[in-house]
């Protein structure tokens, strides 16, 4: 599955059943009724599963990039 970062928190993930078609996957920061911040991933695909496979693929990629960044930071010190 091809994943492209469009902007910070905004990605596109390629459909496996429709090659060349991409779904938008976004990382949102929200406030609940008590004013506490929480994070939510959303995707514009038609899947009823939550999280959908596009969100799972993007979060896996996101975590891998985060781990690589942490490794680079550790080697600089």
Image (cartoon, rainbow, N blue to C red):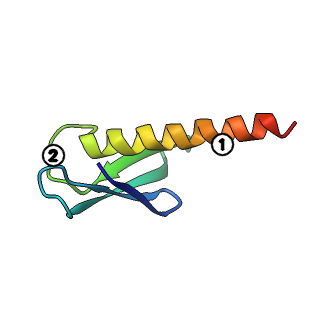
Residue 61 in percent (x, y) is at 45, 42
Rendered image quadrant of residue 14: bottom left
Q: Earlier in the sequence, mark 2 or mark 1?
A: 2
Q: Which residue is mark 2?
A: 47
Rendered image quadrant of residue 72: top right
Residue 50 shows in the view:
yes
**Disc number lying in front (2 or 1):** 1
Looking at this view, is 34 or 66 the one in front? 66
**Above or below: residue 26 compared with residue 39:** below
Q: Within 10 Å of the Cα at label 1, are there few (<14), some (14-19), or many (20+) other Cα atoms?
A: few
Residue 46 in percent (x, y) is at 14, 52
- Mark number displayed over residue 16: none
Q: Which residue is mark 1?
A: 69
Please say if the residues under marks 2 and 1 sit with CB atoms less than 8 Å apart.
no
- Measuring 29% from the left and 52% from the top, which residue is drawn there? 43
- Measuring 69% from the left and 35% from the top, which residue is drawn there? 71
- Measuring 19% from the left and 37% from the top, which residue is drawn there? 49
Say what secondary structure mark 1 lies in.
Answer: helix
Residue 27 in percent (x, y) is at 44, 51
* Quadrant of the image containing the C terminus: top right
Q: Is residue 8 left or right of residue 44?
A: right
- Measuring 62% from the left and 39% from the top, which residue is drawn there? 68
Measure how far apart labels 2 and 1 are at the Cα level: 31 Å
Q: Within 10 Å of the Cα at label 2, are there few (<14), some (14-19), or many (20+) other Cα atoms?
A: few
Rendered image quadrant of residue 67: top right
Say what secondary structure mark 2 lies in.
Answer: loop
């Amino acid at each position: 599955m091809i994943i492209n970062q469009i902007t910070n928190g905004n990605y596109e993930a390629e459909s496996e059943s429709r090659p060349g078609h991409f779904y938008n996957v976004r990382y949102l920061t929200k406030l609940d009724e008590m004013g506490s911040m929480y994070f939510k991933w959303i995707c514009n695909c038609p899947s009823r599963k939550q999280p959908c496979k596009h969100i799972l693929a993007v979060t896996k990629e996101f975590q891998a990039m985060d781990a690589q960044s942490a490794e680079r930071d550790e080697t600089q010190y």
